[in-house]
Amino acid sequence: MDESWIHHFDPETKQQSMTWKRASSPTPKKFKVASSAGKVMASVFWDAEGVIMIEYLEKGTTITGSYYADQIRRLREAIKEKRRGKLRAGILFHQDNAPPHKAGVAMAAIRGSGFELLEHPPYSPDLAPSDFYLFPRLKEDLRGNKFLNDGEVMAAVEAFLEGQEKDFFLKEFVVWRNDGPSV
């Protein structure tokens, strides 16, 4: 699980904006473009089979320990519905060390849900699969598109996630378990 901000508009990267030109042609003018002010916080809970649950933070809301604990309880229900039998088999749960994730109420919700928590090494943001695999690919796919509102952003996020091949999610779990980040 992890969260990430998804912008209404994220300009293309230098690599994406490269154009071919003849040696004698003038260099095209580039204008600096900033990300838009509009953005949506997406919390994505996923496993090797795909996305289990996506939630979007309401405007003016902050992720706190109790907010996150409520998400964990909703996740447990989503696993019951989407991954029948997995709760009995046992759930290995991975999260980063963000303060809301480590809050007492959140840790109690994780234990109360019957999840086994995989410890995240301190000061290691690059070891979360969402940060080195899922979110960069999602943002790369959305980059350069302009969304008029939060609803369009949410629809684009869900379309990207639903459009992935089954092995998209499994692949990085195998790499993460064996070697660490592949990117």
Image: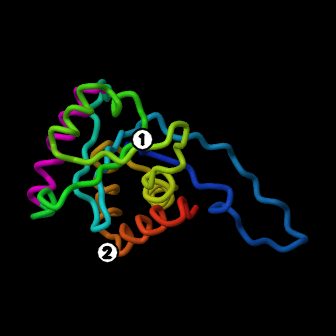
Q: Which mark is residue 139?
A: none
Q: Which residue is mark 1?
A: 96
Secondary element at tag 2 = helix
Q: Decide if residue 44 is on the left or right side of residue 11.
A: left
User: Which of the 4 quarters of the picture holds residue 70?
Assistant: top left
- Type of amino acid at the residue the image marks with label 2: Lys
Q: What type of secondary structure mainly makes up the magenta span?
A: helix
* Image: 109 above or below 85: above
Q: Decide if residue 97 is on the left or right side of residue 149.
A: right
The colour scheme used to paint the residues is: rainbow
Residue 44 or 19: which is nearer the viewer?
Answer: 44
Q: Is residue 66 magenta?
A: yes
Q: Quadrant of the C terminus?
A: bottom right
Q: Which mark is residue 166?
A: 2
What's the residue at 51%, 37% (across, down)? 122
What's the residue at 15%, 48% (across, down)? 76
Residue 40 or 1: which is nearer the viewer?
Answer: 1
Cβ–Cβ under 8 Å for marks 1 and 2:
no
